[in-house]
Amino acid sequence: MKRAVTAIILLCLAVAVPSQANVIKTIGSGADITFDPSIVPLEHQKSYQIMTRKCTTCHGMDRIVLSVLTGKAQVTKQPFDREQAAGYGIRLMRMKNTGLKREEIRDVIRLLQWLIDEKNKR
Amino acid sequence: MSTSIFNQMFLIFDPLNIIQICCWLIAGVVSLYFSVGNARLWTSISFGFFLLMIGQSYLINPLVKYHLVIAMHHVCSVLSIMLISHGIFEYYLFCRTLEISGKKQTVYIATAGILIFFLCFLLVNPNPSPNAIRNYQIIANAIWVILCIANIELCRKIYLSLRNSSIGKGFLGFAVAFALIMFWKGAFLYQQIYQWDRLGQDIYYISGQYLDIDDYADIVKFTYHIISYTGILASMTVVGTHLYFLRQLKSSGGES
């Protein structure tokens, strides 16, 4: 009996651990919600800094976080997947006075696509 | 701020593009006025040119953040050339047989019906991605090029039939407009085939793929100029031809 219980617990842990690993962690709540920087890999850390510093001059971080978590753009209510994120990037590249360079937009979009992928792995 | 409505409009702030849009707005208004105020025979042609203006106006539409709206603009563009071609073909038949059927309202209602059908089609399908929007644009440009060639030939035939009439020369004006539109849409299609169009370049850039555009910078620049100038000239020719027809039809008492 003990063995069976242990086996079930181990099985549950084996199933639960990988799925927990892919949860997009956030910190704060409401308008102050943001992605936990510790989940962002090293290659995207620079883009994460740009996102928190520059993107938030026009809109709150909550808009980005909720779009990624819900899979729906918060203003237009359009789906927010990899392709649509690229669409936002293209639109942003064509806007004037965004304060963002072309390569910065590209890198932030790649970070967003990575976050979307991570969320979808759950 | 950067997300103002003004920034949503004119996403590519190219002065030539803006001049082109303004010219097409004038052409659209003149065409609609001509379509409403003239005989049934002209409805499809003029209303088609009005729809072309709607198709082109996506660059100044603040709702372009909705990808479905851009896709609908391209659907309008396809529908416009089909309507124009239908009108030219009707006129050609009229020249040969002096037969004309249908009502103006039928053309307007059928056009609205097709647009509603495509709106439903887009609504039940996945939200168009930048790639899907580009595909719609490629299809629209390809249809424009093919039908413009057919229309030039039909305009030539109509001109030969109406050579002695006062409005015969007007069809030469339409033939010139179709030739210019063919170069305009054809150059755009050429760019799209090689991913040299702005949207294609941006899609490549965002996805981090290599694009060999630097090796062909002169060709790309040249095609941009063709697209800009032929688009402006085509809209001016459409305005001029419609005004010529208006004057001729007024002086001949509205006979088609």
Image (tube, rainbow, N blue to C red):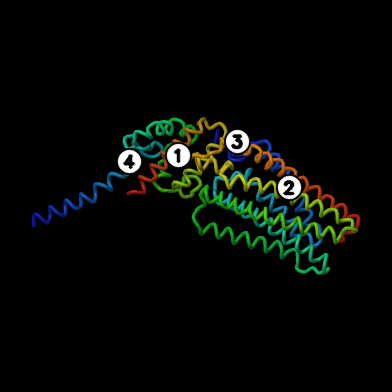
Q: CA distance from mark 4 to mark 3?
A: 45 Å
| 10 Å crowding of disc 1: few (<14), some (14-19), many (20+) | many
| 10 Å crowding of disc 3: few (<14), some (14-19), many (20+) | few
Along the line of sight, the residue nearer the viewer: B240 or B140: B140
User: Circle 2 sits on which residue?
Assistant: B180
User: Circle 4 sits on which residue?
Assistant: A25
Q: Does residue B222 lie above or below B99 as drawn?
A: above
Do pointers 1 and 2 mark residues of a single chain? no
| 10 Å crowding of disc 2: few (<14), some (14-19), many (20+) | many
Along the line of sight, the residue nearer the viewer: B88 or B101: B88
Q: CA distance from mark 3 to mark 1?
A: 27 Å
The local secondary structure at tag 1 comes to helix
Task: Indicate which disc residue B217 carries.
Answer: 3
Q: CA distance from mark 3 to mark 2?
A: 23 Å
Q: Nearer the viewer, mark 3 or mark 1?
A: 3
Q: Are marks 4 and 2 in contact (CB under 8 Å)?
A: no
| 10 Å crowding of disc 4: few (<14), some (14-19), many (20+) | some
Q: Amino acid at mark 4?
A: Lys
Quadrant housing the C terminus of chain B: bottom right
Q: Amino acid at mark 1?
A: Ile
Residue drawn at (77%, 57%) of the image: B35
